[in-house]
Image: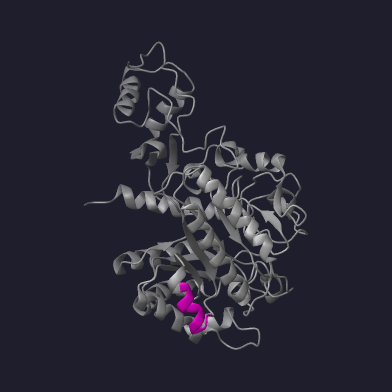
């Protein structure tokens, strides 16, 4: 039914229709992410929409314009279904990431966890309990597999005997339950030949941290003794590429290295065959506070990332940045809002990869459980789990009117809190970055000619 000039149609409760400014243009984007609709609108059209949503009387011309928006699915007769989890969605993890050690063989200048500052290894019984829990949950839920990952904190392969014991236990557990198990790891790539052969035989995939050509890698990611790490990691990347093993490369960029992003893309594509190249601007925390490393300016990251992404597309390489997800509709940036099951070496359960110390003020939010040696099982704080669920984007007031909200999903929630203890989303420089990069993608889409 078309709205008429005397009685405006009541708009849907959740219209999710956004007017987005364009750089240097006298028109705007009209963007409905949930409908996957993008168009252009002029100032008169914006005024008409404001009147419509304000339930003011419309002229016949304005009324016809609104009808066209309905016909073209920018507006809907029924409320759209956002990509949110059901209200009764429960905590029932079938995937665990184990931070099995705080030790590390590198001393990266920007390490968020300051890896190697202490030396703590996980108790094997703790890892067994975590594997048992996710395997049980997967079987109970009728899933075909469960997953076990290794991450840092420290570098997981420095606790190699423990890592392989856990892998073998996970494989035996999967066999007993008639399930498959996915095994994955984030690693700095400082592997010996025995380790990389074992990974090739047993793991599903790797995410390898590597910053690029020798002068960049050796400066930002030196060994404990100060030597370069480039040669070893390069050799291992070539090994995995030649074996056809699935892996991605994760590179961190600073204000000094960001200008070389295009060079990094070209060099990595020519040298290796990664499934993707993931780049992130360094965040001001951890070791970079003492080494003096700084994030690139927003303008520099946008400029060089955009050029690098164009070059990557030309070369057939997927270049990603976590805040640019225009192809996805999400309510959670990651698993941290409620269902991330990650176990630290001491047995603390955290929903966030980056909150690894109990002394971190944010631990009060993200640390929601612990391993009990007495019962050889995990104890969870249900109230904290419920609170974490309310950090998905539909609950975040700061994001309510942002056209990126169903793409970046509120961004990394450990990075967007204010300085106080309220744990309120107050935005960050990444919000500006995400909006501007998404706006560039919208411009590319509107100008696309097949």
Give the x, y percent position of residue 165. 59, 70
The residues colored magenta run 191-199
| 20 or 211, nearer to the observer | 211
Compared across the picture, whether 179 is left or right of 388 comes to left
Residue 296 seen by the camera: no
Which colouring convention does the figure follow? one colour
Q: Left or right: 99 with respect to 13?
A: right
- Which residue of the protein is positioned furthest toward the left in this rendering? 450
The residue at the point 63 percent across, 60 percent down is 128
Left or right of residue 318: residue 321? right
Majority secondary structure of the magenta segment? Answer: helix
Q: Nearer the viewer, residue 20 or 142?
A: 142
What's the residue at 40%, 80% (across, down)?
A: 239
Vertical side of 273 occupied by 449: above or below: above
Residue 389 visible from this viewpoint: yes
The image position of residue 329, as x and y in percent, is 44, 44
The picture places residue 423, in percent across and down from the top left corner, at: 70, 46
- Residue 195: in magenta span: yes
Where residue 384 sits, quadrant-wise, is: top right
**What residue is rendered at 56% in x and 41% in y?**
393
Q: Is residue 215 above or below residue 35?
A: below
Q: Dividing the image into 4 quarters, which one contains the N terminus?
A: top left
Residue at 73% x, 61% y: name it: 357
Q: Is residue 14 magenta?
A: no
Residue 180 screen position, x and y as percent = 45, 56
């Amino acid at each position: 039914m078309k709205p008429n000039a005397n009685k405006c149609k009541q708009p849907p409760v959740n219209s999710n229709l956004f007017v987005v400014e364009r750089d240097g243009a006298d028109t705007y984007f009209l963007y409905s992410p949930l409908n996957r609709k993008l168009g252009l609108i002029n100032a008169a059209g914006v005024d008409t929409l404001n009147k419509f949503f304000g339930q003011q009387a419309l002229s016949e011309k304005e009324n016809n314009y609104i009808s066209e928006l309905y016909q073209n699915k920018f507006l809907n007769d029924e409320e759209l279904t956002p990509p949110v989890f059901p209200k009764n969605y429960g905590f029932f993890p079938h995937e665990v990431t184990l931070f099995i050690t705080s030790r590390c063989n590198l001393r990266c200048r920007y390490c968020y966890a300051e890896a190697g500052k202490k030396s703590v290894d996980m108790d094997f019984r703790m890892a067994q309990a975590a594997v048992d829990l996710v395997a049980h949950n997967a079987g109970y839920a009728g899933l075909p597999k469960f997953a076990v990952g290794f991450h840092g904190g420290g570098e997981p392969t420095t606790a190699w005997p423990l890592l392989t014991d856990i892998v073998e236990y996970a494989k035996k557990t999967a066999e007993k339950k008639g399930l498959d198990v996915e095994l994955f790891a984030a690693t700095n790539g400082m592997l010996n030949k025995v380790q990389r052969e074992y990974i090739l035989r047993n793991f599903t995939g790797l995410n390898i941290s590597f910053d690029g050509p020798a002068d960049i890698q050796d400066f930002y990611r030196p060994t404990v003794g100060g030597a370069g790490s480039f040669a070893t990691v390069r050799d291992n990347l070539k090994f995995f590429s030649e074996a056809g093993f699935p892996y991605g490369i994760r590179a961190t960029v600073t204000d000094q290295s960001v200008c070389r992003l295009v060079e990094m893309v070209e060099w990595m594509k020519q040298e290796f065959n990664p499934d993707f190249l993931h780049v992130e601007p360094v965040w001001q925390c951890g070791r970079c506070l003492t080494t003096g490393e700084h994030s690139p300016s927003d303008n520099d990251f946008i400029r060089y990332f955009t050029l690098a992404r164009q070059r990557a597309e030309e070369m057939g390489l997927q270049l990603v940045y976590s805040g640019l997800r225009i192809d996805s509709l999400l309510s959670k940036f990651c698993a941290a809002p409620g269902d991330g099951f990650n176990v630290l070496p001491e047995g603390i359960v955290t929903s966030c990869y980056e909150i690894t110390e109990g002394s971190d003020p944010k631990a009060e939010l993200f640390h929601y459980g612990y391993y009990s040696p007495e019962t050889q099982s995990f104890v969870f704080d249900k109230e904290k789990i419920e609170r974490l669920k309310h950090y998905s984007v539909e609950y975040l007031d700061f994001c309510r009117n942002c056209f990126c909200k169903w793409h970046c999903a509120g961004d990394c929630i450990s990075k967007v809190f204010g300085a106080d203890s309220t744990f309120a989303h107050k935005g960050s420089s990444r919000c500006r970055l995400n909006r501007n990069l998404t706006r560039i993608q919208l411009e590319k889409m509107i100008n696309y000619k097949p």
